Image (cartoon, rainbow, N blue to C red):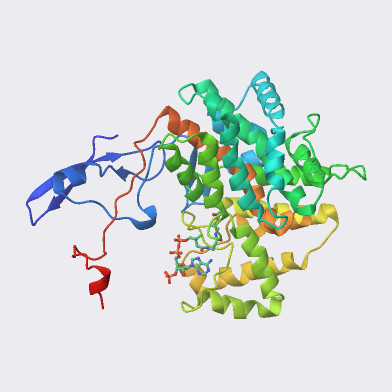
Amino acid sequence: MTDKRVILSDESSGKSVELPVIQGSEGEPTLSIKGVPGELGYFTYDPGFTATASCTSTITFIDGGKGILRYRGYPIEQLAEQSTFLEVAYLLLNGELPAAAEYDEFLNDITYHTMVHEKLNTFIKGFHYDAHPMAMMAGVVGSLAAFYHEKLDMKDPAARMLAAKRMIAKMPTIAAACYRHHMGWPTSYPLNRLGFTERFLHMMFSVPAEEYEVSEVAARAFDLLFILHADHEQNASTSTVRLVGSTGANPYACVAAGISALWGPAHGGANEAVLNMLEQIGSVANIPKFVEKAKDRDDPFRLMGFGHRVYRNYDPRASIIRDAAHEVLNELGTSDPLMELAMELEQVALKDEYFIEKKLYPNVDFYSGIIYKALGIPKSMFTVMFAIARTVGWVAHWLEHCDNPTPIGRPRQVYSGPAERKYVPLSQRD
Ligand code: ACO
């Protein structure tokens, strides 16, 4: 809170209210509008929360105009280059980078919570083989509440932290189990001698018939992608987790709701949609036609992987991922015509007046699908990869909410339905 006040006056009633200005450690000043309904008798209208802060948070800072993203103050570029996913997870959960002993303890905690109850595998086997993995993930993660609910004392910070670590640890195990169910492969268990991403790749791709050697290139690429996707302040899925959390629901239920929100093509489902779009465009020659479609207001087609609610400049994650996509393809010695297509599409769109004027740049998902494809991840699993990483952000925000709870999330509405009318019995209706 600052000493500054903004006065909002209603000429018709002659009433006015002083709105306190809140200034965070960084970012734009924000008006506290809590007093408006009581003093002036108006609610405020902000569909899609484009102008409204729902909470205060110390976790992640974004400056969309300048293309800045920082976790707990550390620029994403530095973390991407020098850190690891689990160190970033520790940072997001605890607020500080760990000392060596703290890091070892954290790694140990995550490693020893990777197994899931065997009954959970039975649950997964109940799904049809071609169920979408995000639908399975939402169901299975929500069902973790049935395994741990009784034992979780939500008032105990240590119990809450344990639930958070459990989810980070078990998410790759559940994701791999969903994939293996689709493939018809037997269950694979987490190998504790491996690191986080190596263990995940082993669970995904090892089969009993052959030795499986985890590719170092793949493990490193996953670690990077997981760092970049770990948190993004009050995005739709994180806000969902916080909203559900505000009801006092258990964290597994909150994260299951976050998974469902992430699945949408306007959010985490975009990485799958980008690849579908590139396949649909097919060749460089077709780019102009599709760019015109994207600009046509009467055509529902949009350039997937372009545009962002917050970034009005380049998404800093997108440039890191584009470089990583080149590196991965080079190191694996493969080329992908979709990569060439994506680069050309980016160039054409960036020079187009429509995209320039609307400040539409590639977002994090524009190139991530190409890396996942090169690493053997099927399209339907792309958003699941995002969910594994974003679980860290979801639980960090859930922990922050529990430490500093907001009232139950309950937006208002502007009612535009019929005014009061009298019920007419069925026999008297025309
Ligand atoms: N292609 C073409 N036009 C676009 C695109 C796009 N990708 N994105 C926005 N626009 C246009 C809209 O048609 C609109 O035009 P108008 O002013 O003439 O009506 C204008 O730009 C503003 O668009 P909004 O949808 O109002 O912007 P908003 O900030 O609400 O949406 C969103 C952001 C949902 C990301 C949007 O840009 C989009 O749909 N992008 C494609 C999907 C995507 O890549 N999502 C991933 C986001 S990143 C993430 O969640 C991890």
Q: Residue at x 92, y 45 (%)?
A: 209
Q: Which of 366 and 403 is in front in this view?
A: 403
Position of residue 148 relative to residue 267, above or below, is: above
In percent of width and height, residue 227 lies at: 64, 42
Horizontally, residue 205 falls left or right of residue 381, namely right
Q: Which of 307 and 200 is in front in this view?
A: 200
Considering the image in quadrants, where does the C terminus appear?
bottom left
Q: Which residue is drawn at 73% across and 35% down?
A: 196
In percent of width and height, residue 111 lies at: 72, 28
Horizontally, residue 415 falls left or right of residue 76, namely left
Position of residue 430 relative to residue 151, above or below, is: below
Q: Nearer the viewer, residue 343 or 423?
A: 423
Q: Which residue is drawn at 78% across and 39% down?
A: 198
Q: Quadrant of residue 30?
A: top left
Position of residue 114 relative to residue 291, above or below, is: above
Horizontally, residue 397 falls left or right of residue 405, namely right
Look at the image and tell me whether residue 83 can be seen: no
